[in-house]
Amino acid sequence: MLKIAIQKSGRLHDQSLQLLKECGIELNNGNRQLKATAADFPLEAYFLRDDDIPQYVFDKVADVGIVGENVLYETGKEIDIVNKLGFGRCRLSVAVPGSMKYEGIKDLDGLKIATSYSTLLQKFLDDNKVKAEIHEISGSVEIAPGIGLAHAICDLVSSGSTLFTNGLKEVEVILNSEAVLAANKNLLQEERKILDNLLLRINAVKAAKKNKYIMMNAPDYQLKNICALLPGMKSPTIVPLAESGWSSIQSVVNENDFWDVIEKLKGFEAEGILVVPIEKMIS
Ligand code: PRT
Ligand code: ZN
């Protein structure tokens, strides 16, 4: 059995459960219990506050946990990041009032900065040889300058709208963060095996999201050009069509190159291009 810590409620809760579901692991947390066991995988979930997850994994109350890098680094717990999960993306930034003249990091010297991330902020200030006073608060950091509690803040930002509505501007990014799967350093062999199996599934789900399956018809004299464009998982599949001189080509394309590839395929006379999502992709 592998014990996993998941945020009880909040921004990472739904996506953590969704990821496990896509891995074929259903956790029934219908009544918001503290604990749930998967029916079809040796996994037991504990639902906790995100701030507590690194400690629980460090103490091996849970073997692994899903948590933001921001929380993990702030707590400084020695646990291993085993997979970056690609959701819960945000950045930890310093922001100052929009009206303040800001030319560089030295402008933070002598200021009072409100934050819930005092460890990460202190390290950032030390690394940059800036002397500022840190005022630790646990919530609603963005209102601190408006009520005269601090000159600046250091908080998580995703869309930037909270800063905007509070008349603040982002001036320094301390950390880029996303949700990660982190593990205790001393897993037993059996736990390690279950984790490896879980990681295989997570990577298959992530790879599938990043790629599309593509099918098209093209004249045979263009096959060489088209194959050079479409590496596929090994190489493209080519099947002759009933009409001589034509083939059907099937391959996998990375989402980032997708539109670029389509444009070039059109240039190589590809027709009837079909693009379908991939559910799982195991290399
Ligand atoms: O109850 P519990 O302690 O478990 O939850 P929490 O309230 O401490 O955390 P929660 O659920 O708000 O966030 C969990 C994790 O989501 C964080 O630790 C980050 O890893 C990640 N995350 C991603 C964010 C954001 N984006 C985010 N935008 N966490 C918080 N915010 C807040 C930010 O603090 C600010 O108040 O959203 C506001 C800014 O958002 P924008 O879009 O206006 O820029
Ligand atoms: Zn929290």
Image: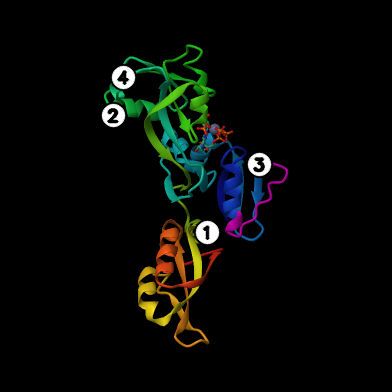
Spot occupied by residue 93 in the image (x, y as percentages of width and height): 41, 30
What residue is shown with label 3? Answer: 34
Within-10-Å neighbours for mark 4: few <14, some 14–19, many 20+: few
Foreground residue among 143 and 253: 253
Within-10-Å neighbours for mark 3: few <14, some 14–19, many 20+: few
Which residues fall within the magenta stretch?
A: 21-32
Please report whichever mark, 1 or 2, sits nearer to the chain's N-terminal start. Answer: 2
* Residue 127: numbered disc: 2
What residue is shown with label 4? Answer: 107
Mark 3 against mark 1, which lies toward the viewer?
A: 1
Residue 31 located within the stretch drawn in magenta: yes
Spot occupied by residue 102 in the image (x, y as percentages of width and height): 33, 21
Foreground residue among 217 and 51: 217
Ligand 2: quadrant of the figure: top right
Foreground residue among 223 and 187: 223
**Residue type highlighted by circle 4:** Asp
User: Helix or strand or loop: what does disc 4 sit on?
Assistant: helix
Above or below, 254 against 61 in this view is below
